[in-house]
Image (cartoon, rainbow, N blue to C red):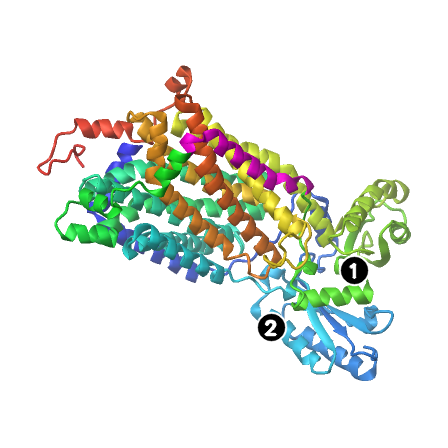
């Protein structure tokens, strides 16, 4: 591996124009493909194997024009104090608004007049219009959303309070602002790390090129592969993260090799052969984590995982080829100003680098020596600290936030509150029960009996039976809960309806299936819970085997996996404390504490595991390399930190900055995700990798690198630490410049 990458790095360095033009051509080709491809249709959100999905499927079969997954908008009207919405002027305005909504967009299926559907509160102060669409929320055009908004603004001129909610009113989040914040933070950190604008710009440039190719390719293939419009979201986030990290690792190693006295071409070959090997295996762990999302068996997550994995592969290949080429163009500008100044004075690169460092041990070296002196104290403090932070996980409650978790100043939240005040909290989360009446002797009587029995269940505000379909073999019964959608009482009601299904079928011959937002949330959460353990086993298991191959050790990969689990549990504990319990709610703009988003645990496991293994591979590979080359275990730890701590710290700070940019986005789900990922990287990089890893290695000594002899014989030697490469270079003949290079390179 190291030998092949050494040759690849040197070839890319020498033929840099060809490499650069190839990547630019690929970027342009992907861009043209994306711009000319047919617009992708969103495949919708499916939950195979769940009752909610079965209900939607039955509805589409028996009520073909009902648009089961169509977007819904709710426009809520509140009359001024002392007035009623049924007053002549107010009623006329509402009726006029209904007509405007019907004609405002071709995507509107219907807009229900509240005075004919009974959508007026008992005290006459509030009414609401339900707007149903032919397309789902992801496929709504900007014109449709704007028409809904404009109709509401016109209605406000009458003096009534008009608020808009529902998924049709949810504006698609534009992550570009958060990404720009992350890129800005990354630029500052890279400049500080490298002391050179050029060296800092290389990781950013290559990451942007990689993400550009990946996202453009996804867009170009979206219609053919039915990828949908949200597939590239995860690819953008992960591609940017690992693209910067991988380039950072190789550029840093290149500068270190030049400081050792090698020419620039030889230095890039050695950097690609050693740090490049770490990049390859770090990338493989990320790919495993992302492809493992297929275990959840939710199509949209599977596609997002595969798309993001493809972007990671692109980032790896770019780091191994384009970075060496760009370093060839950069020349001396890839070094800090102090180093360049020393070089200009005629000092050799090695001496110039030493002079720039003033001969003092860096922070990583000092920290490693501190840990080696007090490994037990550091280990206990780190483990106990993370354990305490992880305690709130024991009360973790999963769900999907509703509009009640939105900012109080937002129109969807105001609409939510007005509906709760005028009609009851359950109006914000009605349950739709689809009834299969094929087995009933008298379908109409069976539907009436089912509606009556559902109305007698606990936590039911009222039941609204719907008409039978044209064939007379199905009906839709709407059940309004007494409590809000995310309340435990509403979840209990869903389970009660499903539990009553067997007795209803025995008595009437009809089958009932319950769905809609509260039921979907329950099924989604259950599916995530069921998949978490298999996903963990698959991802951690495969990565453990991969790390055994990389480090040729049993205990080091085991320590890496256990440390990762500890950091993820601590991060989830922090998320529960802030977003479920409400601790520091004002600091993190948490409007209403509630259940943690259902996909949070699996999403964090996948993303953080990939990034954590990046840091593990890069940091510990350098320790393994030093140990293999003859250093004592303790000295190898110091060497690893001397060369890798600064780079890993920079990479972690960049990732924390990227994820933190999403915390104050205003969207509860996005802020929760940004906070969780940022705090997880903080714990894993600075507590697990920087404290627990050196402490454990110090306590284990040479045992850390133990591998059973039979396994040593079976495992292929991938030479990540470059031992074989070093021997080959040592045996190679010297060239006129006094360097040893492999024959034919």
Q: Residue at x 53, y 57 (%)?
A: 662
Q: Is residue 238 magenta?
A: no
- Per the rendering, the mark at residue 425 is 1
- The quarter of the picture where residue 293 lies is top right
Q: Nearer the viewer, residue 382 or 336?
A: 382
Nearest-to-viewer mark from 1 and 2? 1
The crowding category of the residue bearing disc 2, from other C-alpha atoms within 10 Å (few below 14, some 14 to 19, many at least 20), is some
- The quarter of the picture where residue 415 lies is bottom right
From the viewer's perspective, is 604 left or right of 724? right
In terms of secondary structure, where does tag 2 sit? helix
From the image, which quarter does the N terminus lie in? top left
Report the residue marked by disc 2: 146
Q: Tell me which segment is drawn in magenta.
A: 371-395
The crowding category of the residue bearing disc 1, from other C-alpha atoms within 10 Å (few below 14, some 14 to 19, many at least 20), is many
* Disc 1/disc 2 C-alpha distance (Å): 28 Å
Q: Is residue 378 magenta?
A: yes
Q: Residue at x 83, y 81 (%)?
A: 87
In terms of secondary structure, where does tag 1 sit? helix
User: Which residue ends up furthest to the left in the rendered image?
Assistant: 736
Residue 541 drawn above or below residue 673: above
Residue 462 drawn above or below residue 94: above
């Amino acid at each position: 591996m190291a030998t092949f990458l050494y040759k690849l790095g040197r070839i890319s360095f020498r033929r840099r124009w060809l490499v650069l033009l190839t990547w630019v051509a690929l970027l342009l080709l992907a861009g043209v493909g994306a711009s000319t491809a047919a617009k992708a249709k969103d495949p919708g959100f499916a939950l195979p194997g769940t009752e909610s999905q079965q209900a939607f499927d039955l509805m589409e079969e028996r009520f073909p024009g009902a648009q089961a997954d169509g977007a819904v908008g709710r426009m809520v009207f509140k009359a001024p104090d002392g007035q009623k919405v049924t007053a002549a002027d107010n009623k006329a305005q509402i009726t006029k608004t209904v007509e405007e909504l019907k004609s405002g967009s071709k995507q509107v299926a219907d807009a229900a007049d509240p005075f004919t559907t009974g959508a007026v509160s008992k005290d006459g102060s509030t009414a609401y219009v339900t707007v149903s669409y032919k397309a789902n929320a992801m496929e709504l055009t900007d014109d449709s959303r704007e028409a809904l908004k404009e109709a509401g603004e016109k209605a406000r001129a009458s003096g009534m309070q008009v608020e808009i909610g529902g998924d049709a009113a949810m504006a698609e989040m534009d992550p570009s602002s958060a990404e720009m914040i992350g890129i800005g933070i990354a630029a500052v950190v890279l400049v500080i790390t490298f002391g050179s604008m050029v060296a800092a710009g290389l990781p950013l440039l290559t990451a942007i090129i990689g993400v550009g190719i990946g996202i453009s390719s996804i867009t170009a293939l979206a219609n053919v592969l039915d990828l949908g419009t949200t597939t590239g979201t995860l690819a953008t986030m992960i591609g940017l993260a690992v693209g910067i990290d991988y380039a950072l690792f190789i550029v840093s190693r290149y500068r270190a090799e030049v400081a050792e006295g090698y020419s620039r071409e030889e230095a890039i070959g050695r950097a690609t052969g050693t740090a490049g090997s770490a990049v390859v295996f770090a990338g493989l762990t990320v790919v495993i984590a992302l492809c493992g999302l297929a275990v959840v068996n939710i199509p949209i997550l599977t596609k997002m995982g595969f798309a993001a994995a493809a972007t990671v592969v692109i980032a790896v290949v770019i780091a191994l080829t384009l970075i060496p080429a760009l370093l060839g163009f950069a020349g001396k500008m890839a070094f800090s100003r102090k180093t360049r100044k020393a070089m200009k004075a005629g000092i050799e690169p090695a001496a110039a680098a030493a002079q720039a460092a003033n001969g003092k041990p860096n922070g990583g070296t000092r920290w490693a020596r501190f840990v080696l002196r007090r490994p037990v104290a550091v280990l206990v403090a780190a483990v106990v600290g993370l354990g305490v932070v992880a305690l709130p996980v024991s009360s973790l409650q999963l769900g999907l936030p509703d509009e009640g978790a939105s900012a109080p100043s937002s129109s969807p939240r105001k609409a939510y509150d007005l509906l709760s005040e005028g009609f009851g909290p359950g109006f914000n989360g009605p349950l739709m029960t689809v009834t299969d009446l094929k087995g009933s002797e008298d379908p109409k009587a069976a539907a009436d009996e089912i509606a009556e029995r559902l109305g007698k269940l606990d936590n039911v505000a009222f039941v609204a039976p719907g008409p039978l379909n044209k064939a007379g073999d199905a009906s839709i019964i709407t059940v309004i809960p007494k409590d809000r959608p995310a309340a435990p009482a509403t979840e209990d009601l869903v389970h009660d309806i499903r539990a009553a299904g067997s007795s209803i079928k025995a008595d009437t011959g009809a089958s009932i299936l319950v769905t809609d937002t509260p039921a979907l949330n329950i099924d989604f959460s259950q599916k995530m819970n069921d998949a978490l353990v298999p996903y963990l086993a698959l991802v951690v298991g495969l990565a453990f085997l991969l790390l055994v191959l990389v480090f040729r050790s049993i205990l080091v990969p085991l320590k890496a996996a256990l440390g990762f689990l500890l950091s993820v549990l601590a991060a989830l504990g922090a998320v529960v404390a802030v977003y479920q319990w409400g601790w520091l709610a004002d600091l993190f703009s948490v409007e209403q504490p509630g259940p943690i988003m259902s996909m949070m645990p699996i999403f964090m496991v996948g993303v953080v595991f990939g990034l954590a293994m990046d840091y593990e591979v890069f940091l510990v590979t350098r320790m393994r390399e030093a140990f293999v080359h003859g250093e004592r275990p303790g000295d190898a730890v110091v060497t690893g930190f001397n060369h890798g701590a600064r780079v890993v710290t920079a990479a972690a700070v960049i990732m924390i900055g990227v994820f933190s940019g999403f915390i104050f986005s205003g969207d509860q789900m996005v802020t929760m995700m940004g906070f969780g990922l940022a705090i997880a990287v903080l714990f894993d990089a600075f507590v697990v990798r920087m404290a627990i890893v050196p402490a454990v290695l110090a306590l284990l000594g040479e045992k850390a690198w133990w591998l059973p002899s039979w396994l040593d014989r079976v495992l292929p030697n991938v030479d990540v630490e470059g031992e074989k490469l070093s021997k080959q270079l040592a045996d190679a003949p010297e060239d006129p410049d006094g360097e040893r290079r492999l024959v034919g390179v």
